[in-house]
Amino acid sequence: MLAAIAAVAALIVIGLIIGFVRGRKKQGLPQEPPPPPPEALREDRPKITVDAEPEPTQPLQLEDLVPRPPEAPAAEARVTPPPAPPADLGAFRSGLKSTRGNLISRLAGVFRPGRELDTSILDEVEEVLITADVGVHTAGRILEALRTQMNGGQLSSVDDAWGAIREEARNILASGGQGLAIDQTPTVILVVGVNGVGKTTTIGKLASRFDRQGKTLLLGAGDTFRAAAVTQLEVWGRRVGCEVVKGKDRADPGSVIFDAIEKAKDDGIDIVIADTAGRLHTKVPLMDELKKLGRTVEKALGRPADHVLLVLDATTGQNAIQQAQLFKDALPLSGIVLTKLDGTAKGGVILGIVDQHKVPIEFIGVGEKVEDLKPFSADAFLEALFESPDALDPSEEAATAS
Ligand SMILES: Nc1nc2c(ncn2[C@@H]2O[C@H](COP(=O)(O)OP(=O)(O)OP(=O)(O)O)[C@@H](O)[C@H]2O)c(=O)[nH]1
Ligand SMILES: [Mg+2]
């Protein structure tokens, strides 16, 4: 009897407990947290947070004690844009938009349809060319060609004169770049230029381009005067996935580049790209230092640097032409990279640089992004620059020199 009463009492107690628990569930009262699912131990599980309720106190998990590897920031991810077509006319068009507005739409005003072709045109053309940063020397060359053809009776209309200017621009650019041959292991590319022109950015873009072509790379941090310059190069190195050889703060740039070349030789690296400091070109020591750097490369490599690229900033216009002269006196330049063509109306300076220095433009920079470095193509340049003025939109015509 007693046993039966005890059994009934036990059933009642169990029933009460079940009822109580169900009741709490219905009222939404806090529950004991469910045991974590097996994947809770995975590092990458999403964290679920409920704003309104306080976080239940979780027992300490193993993962809380293990330091998480830092997540690679999205910007540092390996950049693998599709390879650009050989002549990216669209990029030339947008890069030369302001220049076209400044130079070509004004020339189109001079050569307006129906205008009689006479020598008064020559003065107007000269003014447009000089104010568009083509340079006095090169403007003179273009005018001379125009005058000779006019006097020889070869031009009978303003259209013919327009064509003659385009043809002379083509002659100037005929000594175009051949592209950077990578036929030695390692091939050494020395990048020089005054400060702020875009050397380090260009190195990053170039490295990315070569990486996409399957080349192995090593960057040499030859700008040892600014700690930030080394850091900037290291960021690019991480992006591209290549090593950066650096020295101590204020180390001799020559020793850093020497070490980089030695390492590349030991490791069978395809390309070494060396960054350099770019303090003001008017300070003689920079040029002395560059000459010394050239000799160091030769000592480490057994031959001069395979390519010496001078980076010039298109927005500086005529100043870029002068800079080229100073650097040419210090080192045998193999090519020029003209940066910041986007957003400047001074793109006509390309004609002046190539005409005066006979150094080919190898690449143009038309923006800050990795894909904004384009191999220079005289055809694409002329096509984009001399595009029929009828095709110009009003905003381009209104563009003025920046
Ligand atoms: N719009 C535009 N900006 C560019 C281009 N190339 C470089 N820049 C910008 O120019 C600035 C200077 O670039 P850097 O690469 O640091 O120039 P640098 O020659 O290495 O400068 P220093 O190390 O100080 O001598 C940066 O803000 C770049 O993003 C380009 O083609 N277009
Ligand atoms: Mg730099």
Image (cartoon, helix red, strand yellow):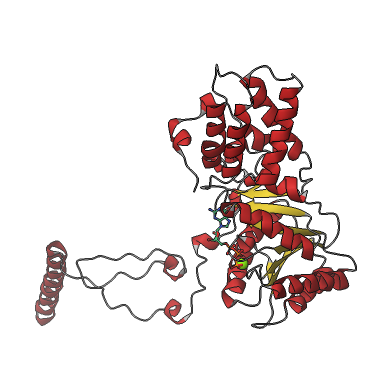
Q: Residue at x 60, y 46 (%)?
A: 133
- Residue toward you, 251 or 151: 151
Label count reads 0
- The correct choice, above or below, for 238 with respect to 254 in the image is above
Residue 247 appears in the rendering:
yes
- Residue toward you, 16 or 396: 396
Tell whether 297 sits left or right of 52. right
- Residue toward you, 252 or 61: 252
Q: Quadrant of residue 63?
A: bottom left
Q: Residue furthest right?
A: 302
- The correct choice, above or below, for 133 with respect to 103 in the image is below
Q: Quadrant of residue 142?
A: top right
Q: Where in the image, quadrant-wise, is ligand 1 located?
A: bottom right
Q: Position of residue 352 (x, y in %)?
A: 68, 46
- The correct choice, above or below, for 285 with respect to 196 in the image is below
Quadrant in the picture for the N terminus:
bottom left
Q: Quadrant of residue 7?
A: bottom left
Residue 376 appears in the rendering:
no
Q: Position of residue 272 (x, y in %)?
A: 76, 64
Q: Position of residue 385 (x, y in %)?
A: 60, 35
Q: Residue at x 78, y 72 (%)?
A: 293
Q: Residue at x 79, y 60 (%)?
A: 270
- Residue toward you, 162 or 291: 162
Q: Position of residue 204 (x, y in %)?
A: 63, 60
